[in-house]
Amino acid sequence: MSVAGPDHRRRVPRTDAVLADPRIAAAAVRLGRPLVKRAVTAAQQRAREGALPPEEVVDAALEALPPAVTTLRPVLNATGVVLHTNLGRAPLGAAAREALAVAAGTCDVELDLATGARGRRGAGVVDALLATVPGAGGAHVVNNGAAALALVAATLASGREIIVSRGELVEIGDGFRIPDLVESTGARLREVGTTNRTHLADYERAVGPDTAFVLKVHPSNFTVSGFTSAVGPAELARLGVPVVVDIGSGLLAPHPLLPDEPDAAGVLAAGAALVTASGDKLLGGPQAGLVLGDRELVERVRRFPLARAMRVDKLTLAALEATLRGPVPPVRAALDAPVAELRARAEAVASRLPGRDVRVVDSEATVGGGGAPGVVLPSVALSLPEPYAAALRAGVPAVLGRLEGGRCLLDVRALAPADDEALAECVRAARVGS
Ligand SMILES: *Cc1c(COP(=O)(O)O)cnc(C)c1O
């Protein structure tokens, strides 16, 4: 560090002057004055020490500022896992992002603008759900899929029994288990059948005066093969007690690529009383939990005291409604993209990287998010030397790829086509020691 003379120190701009710079003032509006002032003070200090030319104080302060007041950083998903739990599952589409901007301010979330009286909170999203899911007489939205199931159990089965197959006692991730979740509401679980086989007769024997409902949980994150059997909702509906199905992924209608994933419309048509599901898996919306089905049961769930503790905010309501009403969300576009299209995109990105050790290779993508286990989505990736993995994670935006066979693979299936350009730019900017 060079020691600056008094003349040099005099040329360091005063704090007031720096804060009055229009770019600095704009940053202070966006990021808050204390944060901006700290960056200015640090830049001034470096200038006084001679480590920075005094006329560069403003630029240096601006450069030191974070892009936003959040420790969250944007990440391009090049993992080939469409619903990556560590990356926040479903990315929202343009319609949902626009809706978020509307809801971020004050909005008529609970106001009838025609009369000026209080309105029904979340009416728009409930209407959109009822229009999308034939057979649902009612719909209610809570924080997440686990909350949807817990609220149904608390409302209908506290102090009573829920019958469930031993083949459907699922751990959903991070150590949380569906049976523990359900029992935490004060309901008792009555397990029937075995791990691999459960029959209608097992359920029949268990039904009694204490039965609140039969629960079917979609084993969304594992498969059992071999000598297996399970009872579907249509048969269970004949038992004469309500059937509640936790379908997990939030498919509202069948998807041709995912024949083993139950969908809300199909399960209700088969005779289930209620379906619970996630909003941010295959539905492609914000984190949310859905309760769909019998109008009277949904109304009881909605009015149950615990429902207030699981209420979603206006941001979730807005993003979910836009996902339901708007164009195909990114998750669905990623699932449905033909391989030829993915290859053309990968080749276009590779062509922007002359002189790099980059190859376009076949790849295998997955649905992820604890859904559709065993389903392989044919895909295409850019293959780069392994050191790119760490270098790309350090970039802005960060890029998360996948290590395979000593190479860093950047799979394009889960990436929005609009981000292809950014991906190429990130690879170009990656600092990889050669
Ligand atoms: C994902 C999942 C859940 C939990 O949903 P969250 O939205 O993550 O709370 C519950 N049940 C099944 C079958 C699931 O797949």
Image (cartoon, rainbow, N blue to C red):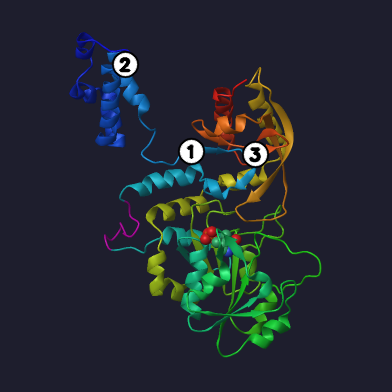
Horizontal side, residue 90 vs residue 351: left or right: left
Position of residue 69 measured from the top left corner of the image (x, y, whole percent): 36, 39
Q: Is residue 102 magenta?
A: no
Quadrant (top left/top right/bottom left/bottom right) for the C terminus? top right
Residue 160, horizontal then vertical, whole percent: 52, 84
Mostly what secondary structure, the magenta segment?
A: loop
- CA gap, disc 3 to disc 1? 17 Å
The amino acid pointed to by label 2 is Glu
> Earlier along the polypeptide chain: callout 2 or callout 3?
2
Q: Which numbered mark, 3 or 1, is in the foreground of this view?
A: 3
Percent across and percent down for residue 181 are: 52, 70
Of pointers 3 and 1, the one earlier in the residue sequence: 1
Of the four image quadrants, the one with ligand 1 is bottom right
The amino acid sitting under disc 3 is: Arg
Mark 1 lies within 8 Å of ligand 1 (Cβ measured) = no
Is residue 116 on the magenta stretch?
yes
Residue drawn at (65%, 42%) of the image: 80
Which contiguous range is marked in magenta?
107-117
Distance, label 1 to label 2, CA atoms, is 28 Å
Could you say which disc has been placed on residue 402 in the image?
Answer: 3
Q: Nearer the viewer, residue 254 or 70?
A: 70
In the rendered image, the quadrant that contains the N terminus is top left
Q: Using the image, determine if residue 182 lies above or below residue 121.
A: below
Query: How many C-alpha atoms fall within 10 Å of the one at disc 1: few (<14), some, or many (≥20)?
Result: few
Circle 1 residue: 74
Is residue 395 positioned above or below 46 on the image?
below
Secondary element under disc 3, as helix, strand or loop, is: strand
- Look at mark 2 in the image and give the residue it sits on: 56
Q: Residue at x 42, y 65 (%)?
A: 310
